[in-house]
Amino acid sequence: MSASPDDATSLSGPPGIDPAALHRPGGSVDDTTQLALFRQMVRMRKFETRAYDLFMENLVKGTSHLSLGQEAIAAAFGEAMDENDYTFATYRGHAHTLARGTSMTGVMGELLGRSCGVLAGKGGSMHLTDVRHGVMGSYAIVGAHLTIALGAAWSAQYRGDPRVAVAFFGDGTTNIGAFHESLNLAAVWNLPVVFVCENNLYMEYTPIGSVTSVANPAADRASAYGLESILVDGNDADAMYLTARECIERARSGGGPSLIEARTYRSGGHSRADPGTYKPPDEAAAWAAYDPISIYRARLVGRGVSEAALDAIEETADGDVETATREAKASPPPGPETLMSNVWSDGGSSWRN
Amino acid sequence: MAELTYRSAVARAITQEMERDPNVVFLGEDVAGAGGVFKATVGLLERFGPERVRDTPISEQAILGAAMGAAMTGLRPIAEIMFADFFAVCWDLVANQIAKSSYMTAGQVSFPLVIRSGNGGGLRFGAQHSQSVESWAMAIPGLKVVAPSTPADVIGLFAAAVRDPDPVLFFEHKGLYATKGEVPDGELVDTLGSARVLKPGGDATIVALAAMVPRALEAAVILAERGIDAAVVDVRSLVPLDTRTILGEVSVTGRLFTVEENPRLCGWGAELVSIVAEECFNDLDGPPLRITTPHIPLPSADALEDMAIPSVERIVTTIERAMQS
């Protein structure tokens, strides 16, 4: 039942894109990975939906940026990366963190500001980090982490360590200087890093096309750094997975950096305060019909996976989200001893004698 | 013991640490092939090779991001920001990323890195290549801030900075690169957060940093001729700050004078005066006074720049007048 992304896909492809322009990665996705991809996406979807609900209950404070509709990208990399590889995510990084195996309770607790949070309540939604699982941070100043990812890649290269760094970012990042500095230096130093642009069509509230000189904000810039132009269907978990594997393998084998533009769509607004009313209804409807989980479920069923097996994955994810929510709610807020710790690596915060 | 320039002390310091630890790597603009625009890193490429001593494009954000990512994954990078003024184009990496990530991640990551930079004025470079920006760094929790005044301190404090597990901004003063000083033979390792009393004194305490230290020492000699016995303390490290040494000296003399190259507002001396006011007010015999560059961008003409930056004459005059009143 091993399948390439071209088979069994009766759907037309992502709205607004000439299918001929899309990257066609080679290889096939085995049965186990197909179910893993489905499981990853479902867990992300259910987690993000719960996070949204908890906002509405005012249990999640501050802000949050959800990956609803974009799950295939984080899921694909979660499956394609080795456990020692480095993830660098953005403030929209819940999904990318979960994808590496971070505990759902740890992420939920962080959103709720509880001591069970993966950052003990000191970082919050936008800074999820779990070094034990290779999540080297979620970064909330657009573009910064591309430079940091190249540093981790440089370090791996220098140490002769086969690790690869993967940096996820949005389409808006392609217009900030750090993007260009990072791509250039990564190319010049031939670093094992994969840059993944999740083009969800909106730079916060503004259509990316209205503020960008090229149609494909990342793919059309690749040639400026001597890189292959890769535009991929970011809602097709198989295509994403095979592309991820291809680029990670290139990096690991000394072939240098890659820049992927994954076309996708943000189902909701930019952040919690944004209902996304500026999105044209036709556009939203077309993408809703091209939801990554719905199309993947249909594809798996078409390949002979039983509905019951997929339902079981959904039910398990429901249970995981329930457990995480319950545990996070039960966890106490961080105590005052947490406030003054960890400014320095000795655990303290003293600046004088 | 040998006489060394401040400039060559930089290369010796980097050499000492790179020879000791293969995880120490060095990157920056023009640092390898050219040996640095201030010729402070000559010979390092030849000695350690292009894998460890790397020229970068003019990409300050990428330089510091690379250093940060390398530090959090096992290396101990040294990054050069050519002129300290250029921190303004990569301050996100310094202030938002490197400084805060240990705290924000509850200690999951640490950043054993050093960012060295040519700081300060006096070379007629104008307002964008002459600033003293150590007070910018001092205002950000999570950064250690060091500024040596002698070749020996360049080596000892730099070694301490490289071996420190936290990020250190190491401000070399451009105006001191050509100065000379005695440097002991062999490995030198100093201690961050230790001020040094360079000259004892009973009447007044002058606290200075970097290029203001030799001026303070010179001023103290003149003041002595005029009957004022001034102590001179080299702060050396703003974070951590050795308040014990400084408060001890001020308690003895009862008078504090800071000499700061930075523009007036929020200079390091302001913090020091505040600490002294809170903690040894009753030992004071008169108001603490700050001798600083006025709150202006630095001008380029030599005549103007010399008026702006605290001079020996201004230090002497200010202290003499204050002590007489």
Image (cartoon, coloured by chain):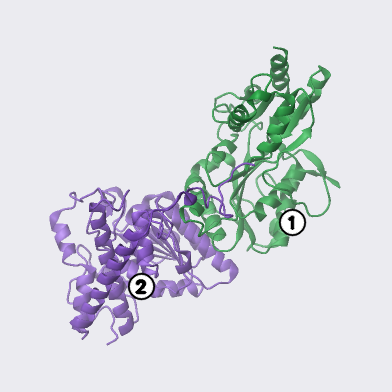
Chain colours: A purple, B green
Whether residue B130 sits left or right of residue A143 in the image: it is: right
In the image, A97 versus B300, the foreground residue is A97
Packing grade of label 2 (10 A; few <14, some 14-19, many >=20) is many
Observer-side mark, 2 or 1, equals: 1
As drawn, A200 above or below B287: below
Quadrant position of residue A168: bottom left
A45 over B310 or under it: above or below? below
Q: Nearer the viewer, residue A301 or A59?
A: A59
- Residue A233 in view here: no
**Residue B204 position within the rendered picture, expressed as x and y whole percent measured from the top left:** 74, 24
Q: Amino acid at mark 1?
A: Gln
Is residue A28 found left or right of B126 in the rendered image? left
- Residue A235: image quadrant is bottom left
Q: Is residue B36 left or right of residue A308?
A: right
Looking at the rendered structure, which numbered label has been put on residue B86?
Answer: none
Of A74 and A212, the residue lying toward us: A74
Circle 2: residue type = Thr
Badges 2 and 1, same chain: no
The answer to whether residue B193 is above or below residue B109 is above
Residue located farthest toward the bottom when viewing the structure as drawn: A1
Question: Which residue in the protein does label 1 denote?
Answer: B16
Q: Percent position (x, y) of residue B223? A: 78, 20
Q: Chain of mark 1?
A: B
Residue B22 location, x and y as percent? 67, 64
Q: Position of residue B173 (x, y in %)?
A: 67, 38
Q: Provide the chain ID for the residue under circle 2.
A: A
Tell me what residue is drawn at x 67 percent, y 28 percent: B259
Residue under pointer 2: A243
Label 2: which secondary element? helix
Left or right, A306 with reference to B49: left
Which quarter of the image is occupied by the C terminus of chain B? top right
Q: Indicate the secondary structure of the residue bearing disc 1.
A: helix
